[in-house]
Amino acid sequence: MRLIVRAILGGGALGILAIGVLMAWPIKQVPESISMTGDVARGAYLARTAGCIACHTNTEEGGRPLAGGAGLVTDFGTFYPPNLTSDPDVGIGSWTVEDFAVALRQGISPDGEPYYPAFSYAFYADLTDQDIADLWAAFETVPAVTEAAPANVVSFPFNQRWGLKLWRAAYLYDPPTEPVEGQSDDWNRGRELVNGVEHCAACHTPRNLVGGRDLAQRFTGNPALPGGSSAPSIQASDLREGDWTISNLAYALRTGVTPSGDAFGGSMAEVVQQNSKFLTPEDLNAIATYLIEGDPLLGNE
């Protein structure tokens, strides 16, 4: 990989050859067959938890569920979440459950092309086969919408998808969702949710100039979210110093009301309205437990 990068930077024939190698480099890992029966209700809950409905529904323009989301304006261009309805041409109706698994866990389309990291696939890598089957069962019930979402508007060089293979090699991390021995069931469930499908670090961790998360600053906040918004620190010590507790954090994630009686604004208000208010009391408590108690393994105490 280092030789390829040096060749590209060096330009000339070697650079062109290296680009060709990158374009041809297969990054898709073929999954095993998924044959279990999916639970539609659980899949719908996962879809809400993971933000699928929030991102892929353009509520600003009264769009139909999962037919494509509002544009996400970033320094690299504007990204439009695609149509995820059952339409076979502009949605995912022609996919298999294995195609679906690869898209979620690996961030790769059925034709082998990498998705832009505006799609939070990095946090879904640990979804189980049963999770995938449940989600797929729920998605199969979504009525087809025949209108495609707008195409991404991305300028050169960011519109060259082969470059995402280099980005992935440098900044694609496995989510730390596995349970930790000695911790409570609530804490471990919170770890699974926060670092997985809830993808809190997507907003609450700063990023570098090419959009990679700075894991040394995990949960310390991000002053430069897309659209001009910002996300505060959710480090355990900062939350506790701000008078957050397990109970009032769980309450805020359900209602949007903070301990001071104020309300969340900006993108966090949208998270509550479209995502966290639908979580079960048990999952809200688990998330709050994990965040308030912190995770020493990730430098968050």
Image (spheres, grey):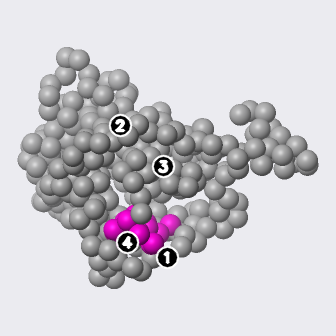
Sequence-first tag of 1 and 2 = 2
Marking on residue 87: 4
Q: Secondary structure at mark 1?
A: loop
- The residue labelled by disc 1 is 150
Q: Residues within 10 Å of mark 1 (few under 14, many from 20)?
A: some
Q: Residues within 10 Å of mark 4 (few under 14, many from 20)?
A: many
Left or right? Give the position of 53 relative to 74.
left
Read off the residue under disc 2. 126
Q: Is residue 24 above or below residue 68?
A: above
User: Which residue is outermost to the top?
Assistant: 182
Q: CA distance from mark 1 to mark 3?
A: 19 Å
Q: Provide the secondary structure element on which disc 4 rests.
A: loop
| Outermost residue to the bottom | 61
Dot 4 or dot 1, earlier in sequence: 4
Q: Amino acid at mark 3?
A: Gly
Q: Which residues are magenta?
A: 79-93
Q: For the residue marked with disc 1, what is the amino acid?
A: Pro
For residue 107, the mark is: 3
Give the amino acid at mark 2: Asp
86 vs 298, nearest the viewer: 86
Pinpoint residue 163: horizontal percent, then vertical percent: 67, 51
Q: Is residue 210 magenta?
A: no
Real-space CA distance between mark 4 and mark 3, rounded to the nearest whole angstrom: 21 Å
User: Vertical placement of 182 versus 26: above or below?
Assistant: above
Please state if 155 lies on the left or on the right of 73 as rendered. right
The image shows residue 149 at horizontal and vertical percentages of: 45, 75
Between the residue at mark 4 and the residue at mark 2, the CA separation in whole angstroms equals: 27 Å
Label 3: state its secondary structure. Answer: loop
